[in-house]
Image (tube, helix red, strand yellow):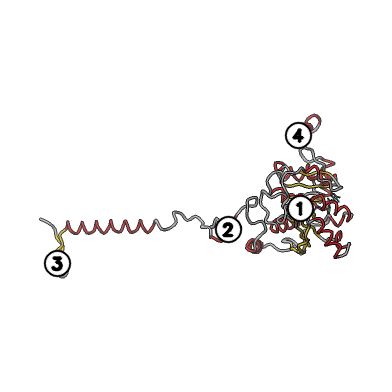
Amino acid sequence: MALSSTSPKGVVISVPVLVLSVATAAIFLFFLLSSLSSSTPPCSCPVIPPSNGGSSGDSRTNPIGSIGRIAATNEDVEWVKRQIKDNGLHMADNVLRKGINPRTREQQLQDLLQFKGISHYEGEEVRNHTALPCPGELLVEQHHSNYGEPWAGGRDVFEFLAESIHLTPDSRVLEIGCGTLRVGLHFIRYLDPAHFHCLERDELSLMVAFRYELPSQGLLHKRPLIVRGEDMDFSKFGSEGMYDLIYASAVFLHMPDKLVWVGLERLVDRLKPLEGRIFVSHNIKFCSRLGGEECSKRLNSLGIEYLGKHTHDSLLFNHYEIWFEFRRSKV
Ligand SMILES: C[S@@+](CC[C@H](N)C(=O)[O-])C[C@H]1O[C@@H](n2cnc3c(N)ncnc32)[C@H](O)[C@@H]1O
């Protein structure tokens, strides 16, 4: 005898019908739930909002070294300010603390000369330890204070110049007087191998570049062409490719005007017509000293056009720098 249930209104539902209804409802519910669950994330991984890397077209997400944004964005600056606040960090005197073996540069150098470091090779083994022994003065980074300007300001200069000319890794760049590579390092890191050239007269600066900065920054493979010279002789730079950028950061003001003109005359044919840029920092007294009209005439005769004066701020300290922009006007 089949069991049956009775509703209050007296409708009789047989057990098989009841079982079938429940099974149908269960199947329906199963499909409904599984379709809902497939539209939610498969895990609780953090979701990157589009403004912070979700869009592949956003150049701010490109790492340095690829084509895209170079300078820090306002969001970057806000982010770092937030990190400082959230971590409770304050502006404070930079007092050396006990307990972490604090050393000034002088003390570090003294230690190196006297004790040669804690673990060092002696006798025959000295010859095995490295192919590139480096003078202690460079190891304690005295050269980071060589030119008065904070070392970190090199990044500001790079960002300004790179963004001004829309630098890409295949751009070609020449720096006149790259010194200890305060600025040049950033170009070398970003550019394709052999695309950074520099003429520098100072032996100590060249030592710094080859024996400390390039090896310590892992940039030897970038093969920058850095040539010793002081008379604006660019013959060692070959004739392959035209420069997208030629710049002199805090250099022309230290040179005799006549030498600056010799350099410009020799370099103008090496600069990409119209698109390429020459940037000179601080002042252009080599030109203005001639008098406004004479200055323009002389530039014109070389096929160089003055485009204007710019200032740019530092991200790190209350400082701005002045730059003068030129281009090659004749093709
Ligand atoms: C104030 S430093 C600037 C170095 C670098 N450009 C920077 O911004 O950090 C000036 C540099 O120009 C170099 N210099 C001066 N006269 C030069 C010349 N005639 N030829 C090549 N380099 C020169 C100096 O040796 C020095 O390294």
Q: Is residue 40 left or right of residue 63?
A: left
Q: Is residue 208 left or right of residue 59?
A: right
Query: Of label 1 and label 4, which has the lower sequence position?
Result: 4
Camera-near label (4 vs 3) is 4
- Mark 2 = which residue? 58
Is residue 241 depicted above or below 60 in this figure? Answer: above
Circle 2 sits in a helix, a strand or a loop, which is it?
A: loop
Tell me, for residue 129, which label it has, or none: 4
What amino acid is at disc 3?
Val
Asked if residue 152 shows in the view, the reply is: no
Camera-near label (1 vs 2) is 1
The location of residue 260, given as percent across then percent down, is 85, 54
Circle 1 sits in a helix, a strand or a loop, which is it?
A: strand
Camera-near label (3 vs 2) is 2
**324 or 273: nearer the eye?**
273
What amino acid is at disc 1?
Ile
